[in-house]
Image (cartoon, rainbow, N blue to C red):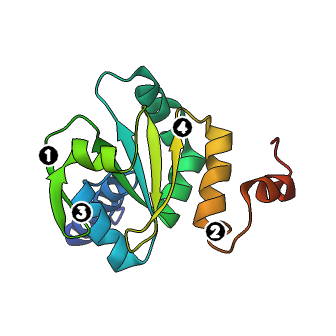
Amino acid sequence: MRKSAPPLLLATLSIALLAGAARAGEWKSWNAGLSAAQASNRPVIVDVYTDWCRWCRQMDRDVYARADVRQYLDTHFVTVKLNAESAESVTYRGRTLSARSLASSFDVSGYPTTIFLASNGDHLVNVPGYVDADRFLLLLRYIGDGHMTRGVSWDEYVKKAGAKP
């Protein structure tokens, strides 16, 4: 007779696995993301998109969905999606404004735009447009591993990493 795991153990393991799967690759709202960044002391990546933007959907499909990009994002950043045309209320620096106004305040003028913020919400840099997955992963490592905050220039980092400029 074969022994099986106790039902309670199986249920506990199933719940833990499902909870982990739900967290992996999870994009947060603006307010939840900034709170999570402060609590975890991790920088924020904000994917600024619109519903009609073909390149935004391509970033989702070809870049954010790639396993190595997703793994790096999940372990080094808090990920936030911001619809640049939404009237949703968000809070930044004690001010409540629409997502549309917030995107505008970061000088977003094209989509997609990727905004990087420090864990305290300080603006680091905007990266406009579609970026292919290999280049994007290099950018994530540049910011996520602290090279940018240590004053290493992008060109110097790319050269040291052996990537194409």
First in sequence: mark 4 vs mark 1: 4
Residue identified by numbered label 4:
63
Which residue was labeled with disc 1? 88
Rounded to the nearest angstrom, the CA distance separating label 1 from label 2 is: 32 Å
Q: Eyeballing the image, is 93 above or below 134? A: below
CA–CA distance between discs 2 and 3?
23 Å
Taking the image as shown, residue 70 lies to the left or right of residue 140, namely left
Query: Residue at 32% of width from left, 45% of height from top?
Result: 103
Q: Please, what is the three-letter code of the amino acid marked with disc 2?
A: Asp
Residue 69: image location, x then y, percent: 56, 48
User: Cβ–Cβ below 8 Å for labels 3 and 1?
Assistant: no
Name the quadrant of the C terminus.
Answer: top right
- Distance in Å between CA atoms under marks 4 and 3: 23 Å
Q: Earlier in the sequence, mark 2 or mark 3?
A: 3
Residue pointed to by mark 2: 145
Query: Who is closer to the viewer here, 60 or 108?
Result: 108
The residue labelled by disc 3 is 32
The CA distance from mark 4 to mark 1 is: 26 Å
C-alpha separation, residue under disc 2 versus residue under disc 4: 19 Å
Judge depth for marks 4 and 1 and give the one in front. 1
- Circle 4 or circle 3, nearest the eye: 3
Give how far apart the Cα atoms at labels 3 and 1 are.
13 Å
Q: Amino acid at mark 1?
A: Glu
Q: Are marks 1 and 2 in contact (CB under 8 Å)?
A: no
Q: Are marks 4 and 1 in contact (CB under 8 Å)?
A: no
